[in-house]
Amino acid sequence: AQRVTQPEKLLSVFKGAPVELKCNYSYSGSPELFWYVQYSRQRLQLLLRHISRESIKGFTADLNKGETSFHLKKPFAQEEDSAMYYCALRNTGFQKLVFGTGTRLLVSP
Amino acid sequence: GAVVSQHPSRVICKSGTSVKIECRSLDFQATTMFWYRQFPKQSLMLMATSNEGSKATYEQGVEKDKFLINHASLTLSTLTVTSAHPEDSSFYICSATSRGPREHTEAFFGQGTRLTVV
């Protein structure tokens, strides 16, 4: 079965500190991995996806198939990064997304 | 990015009544729409997947007769909670994927509907 695990419910850091939001998945095939972000009072939106190998707002995420992980990283956190972050998995060829339970990132000044 | 609009954003209804929630893709054609339910401080739980013109596919444990989904056009899907009870109170979110040339289609989310059954 497909499963996405985000072990941290809350991650609190100071501005300028490095951030790593953990995501592990279980899936037997070749999944697509995503990070979604939800800022306060806003809708869920795509932050980045593993196939793009891009950096968005300073965030990067590398798919590690050996460790079945897709951790989200940013070297220097900003206050505006405070939000709820969801890791999600999609079966290649299908459209259904499976979400993790989310991690709330709080960046303090 | 593309816009998905949900209506209403909040609704309060009496126990036993039915409530309809609309999900519209405003500037693209959505071949597939998804309905999620989110409990407080929990993840999004997929309820069903609907493709335009065909019956929705429900996830295990989701009552088809209670949560009626209609996807009559490429821009509109509706979720009707029938005979609502207080335990149906939740945050309902829809998302839609576009029919586009890209191999990997992005899912766009609505702003959600807060349903409270009293």
Image (spheres, rainbow, N blue to C red):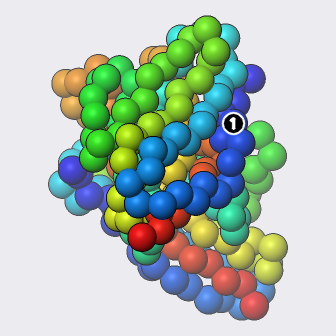
Query: Which one is nearer the viewer's eye here, A86 or A93?
Result: A86
Dot 1: what SS?
strand
Locate residue B115, reporting x and y percent. 62, 78
From the image, tell me which residue sits under label 1: A5
- Vertical side of A38 occupied by A3: above or below: above
Left or right of B55: which side holds A52?
left
Q: Residue drawn at (71%, 75%), measured in percent from left and top?
A: B89
Query: Which one is nearer the viewer's eye here, B35 or A6?
Result: A6
Query: Which one is nearer the viewer's eye here, B60 or A51?
Result: A51
Q: Quadrant of residue B19?
A: bottom right
- Vertical side of B26 occupied by B91: above or below: below
Q: Residue drawn at (57%, 65%), measured in percent from left and top?
A: B92
Quadrant location of the N terminus of chain A?
A: top right
Left or right of B42: which side holds B71?
left
- Vertical side of B65 occupied by A73: above or below: above
Locate residue B93, reporting x and y percent. 52, 61
- Vertical side of B82 occupied by B4: above or below: above
Quadrant location of the C terminus of chain A?
A: bottom left
